[in-house]
Amino acid sequence: MTIATVARHAQVSRQTVSNVINAPQLVRPETRQRVQDAIVALGYRANQAARQMRTGRSRLIAVRIEPTRDGINGTVLDRFLHGLTETAEASGYRVMLYTAPDVDREIAAYGDLLSAYELDGFVITGTDHGDPRTAWLAEREIPFVTFGRPWDHPHAHSWVDVDGAAGTAEATAHLVTAGHHRTGFIGWPAGSGVGDDRRAGWRRALLDAGMDPDGLDVQTEDGIAEGARAARELLGRPVPPSALVCASDSLALGALQTLRSAGTAVPVIGFDDTPVAAAVGLSSVSQPLGDAAARCVDLLTDLLDGPHRDPRQVLLRPALVLRHPA
Amino acid sequence: MTIATVARHAQVSRQTVSNVINAPQLVRPETRQRVQDAIVALGYRANQAARQMRTGRSRLIAVRIEPTRDGINGTVLDRFLHGLTETAEASGYRVMLYTAPDVDREIAAYGDLLSAYELDGFVITGTDHGDPRTAWLAEREIPFVTFGRPWDHPHAHSWVDVDGAAGTAEATAHLVTAGHHRTGFIGWPAGSGVGDDRRAGWRRALLDAGMDPDGLDVQTEDGIAEGARAARELLGRPVPPSALVCASDSLALGALQTLRSAGTAVPVIGFDDTPVAAAVGLSSVSQPLGDAAARCVDLLTDLLDGPHRDPRQVLLRPALVLRHPA
DNA sequence: TTGTAAGCGTTATCAA
DNA sequence: TTGATAACGCTTACAA
């Protein structure tokens, strides 16, 4: 069934049907109604390929599905993808998936996706300092939104992010209020935007409370074993922390194991609120992933359809989820 | 850049370029080489929309991204999706995502996807007895593969599944070999294909070992709290089990909590090998999700491109992953 | 307000 | 073996 079928059914020309769909104000209400009735009666849906050929727009946005990393923090993507798909559908877009083992091949994939499918835009996750992907896209003026800030140039393009510092600050403040005078932090090595941000939140909260953060934190790669080791190191210090905030649930989980076997009653708060945290009763900072995904689509469709195509930025607040270890 | 650009560059007609791409055997090797060189030199990629308009094929397959359920077992989808995207890319297909809050609206989405985007096929996850979705698709002769068996009619269509019974049987046999004379089972209420299958494996393994499964199992909805409750019930029986196999990691995790607080040394084996299991050191039955996804794509592309379009079935064996609780 | 004509990039048909 | 022509379904420009 084509636009011609509808035209015949509604006794108008093909063009009038197209106008009803794309510029209804041009068509007399009476005719418009007749055409719309025909569309409904026949269950007509415009063929995207034909439309795309004419307009050069595919109404497709691309997202990378990453190879699952350690599995704990990897589950974040799931919820994000679902939110993205849902919001995109509501805005008349569809989500296409792609994978790439590394940044170079991801950029190569952009070329493919763009020339073969004429993708309208990209949602890029997990950006870091001086990301070559965003540079490539920006250079070619291809619309994109990142989930994660461009740490170097905060206003370079549209992005959505979660305020990690606010999250760790809230977690730290919670522990301080609960009476802990020495709240430590287990985070990643300096240099990653996300990691530095989360550490900064902890630090700021302590300073705000008039406490000294020095000697209360450790830097380590992500992982359960690493978290356990870091916690052991902190506990072995002359004046050990009485509470812990961690940059990820993996680290927190490791810390929890160390603390449990040491029999110490040191509360731990993780980050990301993964299913693992929920399962073991670990308090954690929860990212509003559904919201973040929705805002990504909003910003992208703004770039694509909006009247003002200036980049915009959205910073969302995470929520502290308190639990009691089982 | 279009096929015409390439044609000019290689000094041939548009049609010859098309032939080089779609039916190379028709073109003299010398000409073919010249055209291929031009394609590479220009970085030409065929426009899918135009090709689709002509052929009626989009080289797009659709997969539903489900709203994350309890989060623990929900992570299964992540790995599956990644495998799917990767294998699809290798076969020249792309994966398009869609969501639907319920079965009716999922079927409505099929109509949309098919008429607007002319999707070539679907990968349907989580089928159950008398699934209306597969009936709808089969009726219209739309190619699809399910991940999960059609329990009513094993040969109705192409599917890939993981042998859940083999998994629980292996877990059970492992415990029996370790000397457990009373291995219990916590599973879901009878009626779901997957749940019944997993229970059957446990049962068969006990019978094979000459043991009596009666009175050693519980039926409960999925969840951590439910697993904990079920384990309490089993432990309270006159002759309690000395080891447990569970239909999911959620149930196993709950059982583990009960057993820990009871101070009983009863080993537990879960199902799905979720990140949670890895994190808490829970032994679990692991589904080969990457393989399963790859086989789904294989079966679907067989249906789409293959010479023989008969439905095929693939049953994969899961693997028992043994761990020691931390 | 409605209709006609052209063209988007590709492939299938058929003639050279 | 190669090339010209038409057609896929749609939208834009323009004419009626």
Image (cartoon, coloured by chain):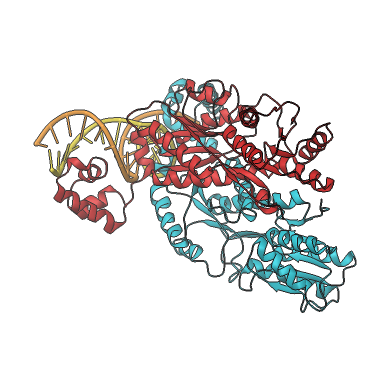
Chain colours: A red, B cyan, C yellow, D orange
Camera-side residue of B302 and A51: A51
Image location of residue A137, percent across then percent down: 50, 25
Residue B234 lies, with reference to residue A286, above or below; the image says below
Image location of residue B206, percent across then percent down: 81, 73
Residue A153 placement, left or right of B272: left
Camera-side residue of B20 and B168: B168
Residue drawn 81% across the image and 71% down it: B241
- The image quarter containing residue A286 is top right
- Residue B145 shows in this picture: yes
Camera-side residue of A232 and A21: A232
Residue A65 lies, with reference to residue D1, above or below; the image says below
In this rendering, the count of numbered labels is 0
Image location of residue A43, percent across then percent down: 31, 56
Residue B51 placement, left or right of B297: left
Residue A211 placement, left or right of A291: right
Camera-side residue of B177 and B142: B177
- Residue B59 shows in this picture: no
